[in-house]
Each structure stands twice: as structure tokens, then as C-alpha cells.
Amino acid sequence: MPAQVKYRYTAHCCRDIKKTRAFYEDVLGFSLVQERDSNHEMTAKLLRMSWPFVVNLVFLQKDAFMIELQDFALHGVRGERDWAPNRAGLQFVSLDCKDLPGVLRKIPACGGVVLEDTHTGMSCCALDPDGQVLELLDMRIYAGAGLPKDAAQMPPIDAAWPATKFRHLAQVVGNMGASRRFYEELLGFTFVLARNSSRPGTAKLLRMPWPMELDLTFLVKDGMELELMHYPSHGTKPAQEWITNRPGLGFNHLDIRDLPRVIKEVPGYGGRVIEETNIGNACIVYDPDGQPVELVGVK
């Protein structure tokens, strides 16, 4: 029986939290939810950080997606993002943009980088100030389940549209069946749809060699859509080792009822419990591909 789960947020470690916050607010239209600090010894254990410990947190929201910006004040950051499009784990946040050219013009001035070689005319990838990949789509062309319209029939910008709209959080997986079992049967995500993409434009956007086959499964939890991606034509590179203070996306935070039962069942669904992070009411586990997930017990 799937656990009773609620999606809370997705963690994102920052080099400079003020700079990253300004990028998401000013360029992408995220809204501030909360600012706070945490210096609890048990939180340090949960995140595998040495003591003494403090993390400055800023929570920003776009539709059903919430991002927790983390600044590990005493520890700094370690390592770099290594974007390989077929590397297992969290890949990018996908956003519809009312004015894609306008968003792309803002990015360099706010500390990001436009990946010009990925520009398809209707979509483009960019890096935020921490090197985290973002997928940006022209909402005048894309609609519904991601099926592109004819660019020649692109409607004018509608003033009523938001500047950006959250589309999904993308994650590469090595075995679609195993990942679906983990997220649907264990964690209670709901299946939305599955489809295949083999378009040259998609390969260009994702920096993948052509020809390319891409299997996609869309799951949802509390309005937050998770896109599972599998490349049967190119294979899957192993996930990077989880380093809490590596810049960029880290893990999804899920509130769970009956946490002890779920932790006990994780290995049976192809995951692994990171035992040293278990603080009783919270624990980090790996999914079948080694992507960390933060599980927090609630009543």
C-alpha cells in the first residue's frame, strides 16, 4: 500500500543565496514564501554535515513547485554540477515562458548562462548562477502535454499569462519500471501519462546525439509534476555521489505518515536507506538510481 505522502519542496544548494534568489525572483517570477535559519545538530546529521552547522534557507514558489535555497554558511560549497543529459538523478526544472526571448536576454545580467547551442526556436536550456540547468519553453508554441504547435501559428503574447509557469521537474532514470514502482507504489505518486519522444529538436535541446529515443513518464504529487526520463538509445550514466553542499538541485522533501514502515520497505523497492542520516523522525534514502529523497515523518 502506498504511503500517505505530501510533497513539500525541492532542495537547491547555492554559492551566493542572494544572487540565486534574485535570479529566480527577477528572471523567472518565483515568489518568496519564507526565510529562516537552521542550526540544529540533528539537522546536520540528517544532511551529513559536520558540527558546528548552520544553513540559511529561502523558500521560493512557482505554482505547485517550491524550491528551498540553501546556503551552508560555515561549510561553503563543494564541487561543480556535472550536466550529462543522460546522467541519473534530478536534471532540471522545466518552465513555460510568456516571453522566451525576453527571459533569455535577462539571464546573463543576473548571473546565469544561456546555452545557445540548445536553442530550437521554441525552447532553450540555461544555467542558473549555480550551474543548475533550466529548461525554458515558449508557452505560445508548447501546450497541453508538451506537443508543439506549428511555430507559424504562434499566437501573440497574452497579457493575462503569467511571466513563467512551472511545467515539471525532470529526473533521468536507468530503469523506468523500477523507478515507477518506487515512486508510485512506495511513495504514492500518481501516474499521469507516458509517451516517447524522438524529435531532432528535443535532442538538440537536451544536447543528445541524434538519432535519439527518449521514454517519458509523468507522475504527480500535490500538483508537482515529476517527469521520469529514460534514454533506451544511449543508456544511463550513474548518478553523481550525493554531496549535500554541491551547488544545484539536491533532493525532494516529502512528508510521510508511518515513516518507519516506509524506511523498512525502501530496499524492497530497489532503494537504499542512508542509515547515518536516520534521526528518528527523518531520514535520507536513495531511489533505485541513487537519487536522494528526504523523508520526514508527520502525524
Image: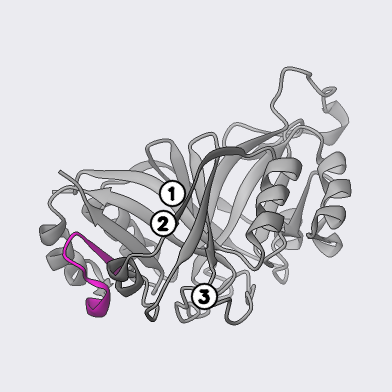
Residue at (78, 19) in percent of width and height: 158
Q: Position of residue 203 (x, y in %)?
A: 71, 61
Residue that carries the numbered disc 2 in the rendered image: 252
Find numbered disc 1 in the image and state the secondary structure of the residue it sits on.
Answer: strand
Mark pair 3, 2: CA separation: 23 Å
**Quadrant position of residue 102:** top right
**Mark 1 highlights which residue?**
9
Earlier in the chain: of badge 3 and badge 2, it is 3
Of tags 3 and 1, which is closer to the observer? Answer: 3
**Quick one: quadrant of the C terminus?**
top left
Name the front one of labels 3 and 2: 3
Which numbered disc flags the more N-terminal residue, 3 or 1?
1
Q: Which residues are magenta?
A: 274-285
Element at label 2: strand
Whether tag 3 and tag 2 are in contact, CB under 8 A, the answer is no
Compared across the picture, whether 16 is left or right of 108 comes to left
Q: Earlier in the sequence, mark 1 or mark 2?
A: 1
The residues tagged by marks 1 and 2 sit, at their Cα atoms, a distance apart of 6 Å
